[in-house]
Image: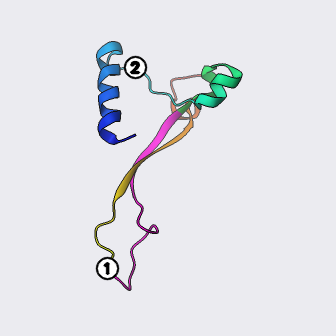
Amino acid sequence: MKLSQLIELLNKALAESGPDTPVLLCYEQGAMEEGYAESSTEGISDVRLVEDWPLPGKSLLTYEGNKPQKLVLFYDNHYKLDSSIES
């Protein structure tokens, strides 16, 4: 999925549910096999731009040009991330 596609989907969700809707991550295959359970969902813990060409990091020997970046969403159990949710 590209960032523009994600933004389009997020804008649709925003229009339907409002700006204060919680965002959770769920492993689709696990939900299909075991059923959806909010306790097994995850929350976003960090968002970073990561360079990925051909290896992470900058070469000190050769100029490799501008490195393309990927947007990476890191996640953890949402109960650990949201202090307003009691476990």
Residue 16 image-quadrant placement? top left
Left or right: where 69 falls relative to 78: left
Write down the quadrant of residue 36 in the picture: top right
Rendered view: 69 above or below 74: below
Q: Quadrant of the N terminus?
A: top left
Q: Amino acid at mark 1?
A: Tyr
Residue 31 in view: yes
Q: Which residue is mark 1?
A: 63
Residue assigned mark 2 = 21
Q: Which marked residue is nearer to the observer: mark 2 or mark 1?
A: 1
Label 2 CA crowd tier, 10 Å (few <14, some 14–19, many 20+): few
Tell whether position 57 is magenta. Answer: yes
Residue at image x 39%, y 52%? 70
| Above/below status of 73 relative to 20 | below
Q: Does 82 appear in magenta?
A: no
Give the side of residue 22 with respect to residue 12, left or right.
Answer: right
Residue at 33% over, 75% down: 64
